[in-house]
Amino acid sequence: MIFRLLIYCLIFTSFLTSQWISFDLSKADAATFDKQVEPTIISSVLTGGRSTLLNLTPNQRLGIAVSMPIGWDIAKTSYQLNPFIHPFMVEGQFLITENLVLKGKMNMFSNGEESVQVAGYGCNYFANSWFSSVSIGWLEGPKHLRVRFVDTTVTMKRALFNMPAFFGAGFNKYRGNILGLNSDDLPEEIENSISYLIAGTELQFSGIDIELQTQIHFKFVQFNVTIFRLFF
């Protein structure tokens, strides 16, 4: 109960001290446009590409997860202030064979200026102590930006100090198309790839299953709080 209250307080405090992630690229300086826009793209592809590590079984084939990603531009090159807050992501996973899971996730929200959708789909393969994940996804809706990405991860699960823990690495290849700014000095697209580390744990309080996961890149760190439930 105390932990649940702490999570709610952290989320509420974040709402009071910051705002939803902004996709208004007109705020970026033309001289350093790529560097200022890249954190927004990285935050979006980490949000869409991340997979919750659900322990699905033949007796519990369906999993539903709701997560809230909060990111920080540690290089401090962005046109917007930290933290980068995405609205809740909803993810569904379904076990189709002993080791293979199909998954999909999305959110749709309005930041007061425009409607935004982050979505993705893919599959997970898991064994007793490790997971691999492949996701394809996109960002649609913002007036100035469209993003496509492919994300792959490998994650190991271990017991650490009698608590479940997981560690891994990921790779994300993305392309962002710049729209509607009408300037010859700005690029038409930003294409790049990032590698990142993964660390996290699972907890259970008052019957609620919680996953805490961090994605760590040398320019950007994203923390995810996820509540999930298994069915059937």
Image: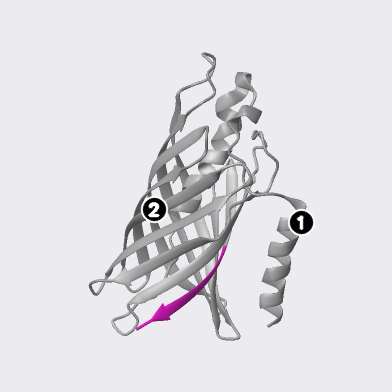
The residue sitting at 76% across, 56% down in the picture is: 16
Q: Does residue 227 belong to the magenta stretch?
A: yes
Task: State the SS at label 2.
Answer: strand
Q: x, y (%) of residue 88?
A: 55, 60
Q: Which residue is mark 2?
A: 120
**Position of 32 relative to 50 (above/below):** above
The residue sitting at 43% across, 71% down in the picture is: 64
The residue sitting at 34% across, 84% down in the picture is: 232
Real-space Cα separation, disc 1 to disc 2, in angstroms? 29 Å
Q: Type of residue at label 2?
A: Gly
Which of 224/62 is in front? 62
Which of 136/151 is in front? 136
Task: State the SS at label 1.
Answer: helix
Which of 145/13 is in front? 145
Q: Is residue 196 visible?
A: no
Residue that extends furthest to the top in the rendered view of this protein: 184
